[in-house]
Amino acid sequence: MQKQPLISIDVSTGPYSLFCEKMMQLGNDLQGGYVCVANVHMLVEAYKDKNFADVVNRSTITTPDGLPLTWALKWLYGIKQDRVAGMDLLPDLLSLASQQNIPVLFYGGTEDVLLKTGEFLKEHYPGIPSVEFLSPPFRALTPEETDEMIHRINSSGAKLVFVALGCPKQEKWMASVHERVNALLVGIGGALPVMVGMQSRAPRWMQKCGLEWLYRLLQEPGRLWKRYFVTNTIFLYLLVKEKLRKKR
């Protein structure tokens, strides 16, 4: 897929359906690779950390998760781009996996979330022939533990591996292991508890207005206020700076 440089990251472009089609193809080919689902937070983190920018830009696909990224592509380059949000992508890929009888694996997440996910998949995606779950410890793995995790992923037969470690941990992990994994790795962040109903998603009108971040902020103000207010301000500054640079 084509990628368009956007401030600090290279964002894949094309219609939403093409993203789903390409990911299923990559999973079926068993050639590895990884998908970053990019939002403003990821873009700003990449701007501040060149090593992390390299991690994102080496991805097989980087989707424009947040509406602000699609607006930026339009404003800077005239590219009319569909939003490819992780919270939409996850259920759509699972639906395709169910239709095509493709095994999947979830890496990361708490035991409660994974238990709920197992029940949810049995009810909503019965065509998936095999679902595996791996919940690594909340610390850096030893080389031996990493080897064991990779062995268990490859032994599972999964073609799609949904990675729920949170940004930037999941992106760094995917970049470090993808060449040894016989499946497509897809970073889904916090999409899993929303999909299974443990957390609510913003109303449709807020999604369309690009206010999904505000809904999440109201849910978890103590944890998210700095990320959204500081990060969004930096993003607007970088966006205007890039626009002025292009004009010059």
Image (cartoon, rainbow, N blue to C red):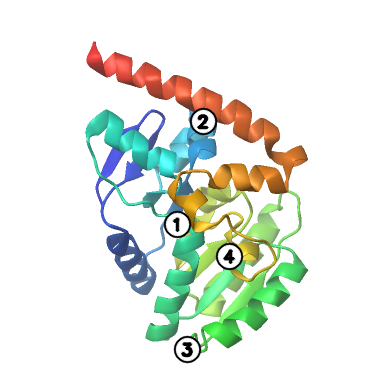
Contact between marks 1 and 4 (CB within 8 A): the answer is no
Q: Quadrant of the C terminus?
A: top left
C-alpha distance separating marks 3 and 2: 39 Å
C-alpha distance separating marks 4 and 3: 25 Å
Q: Nearer the viewer, mark 4 or mark 2?
A: 2
The amino acid type of the residue labelled 4 equals: Ile
Q: Is residue 18 left or right of residue 148?
A: left
Q: Which residue is mark 2?
A: 44
Do we see residue 223 in this rendering? yes
Q: Is residue 100 left or right of residue 226?
A: left
Badge 4 local density, few (<14 within 10 Å), some, or many (20+)?
some
User: Going from the N terminus, do you reach mark 4 or mark 3 first?
Assistant: 3
User: Going from the N terminus, do you reach mark 1 or mark 4 first?
Assistant: 4
Q: Nearer the viewer, mark 4 or mark 3?
A: 3
User: Going from the N terminus, do you reach mark 4 or mark 2 first?
Assistant: 2
Contact between marks 3 and 2 (CB within 8 A): the answer is no
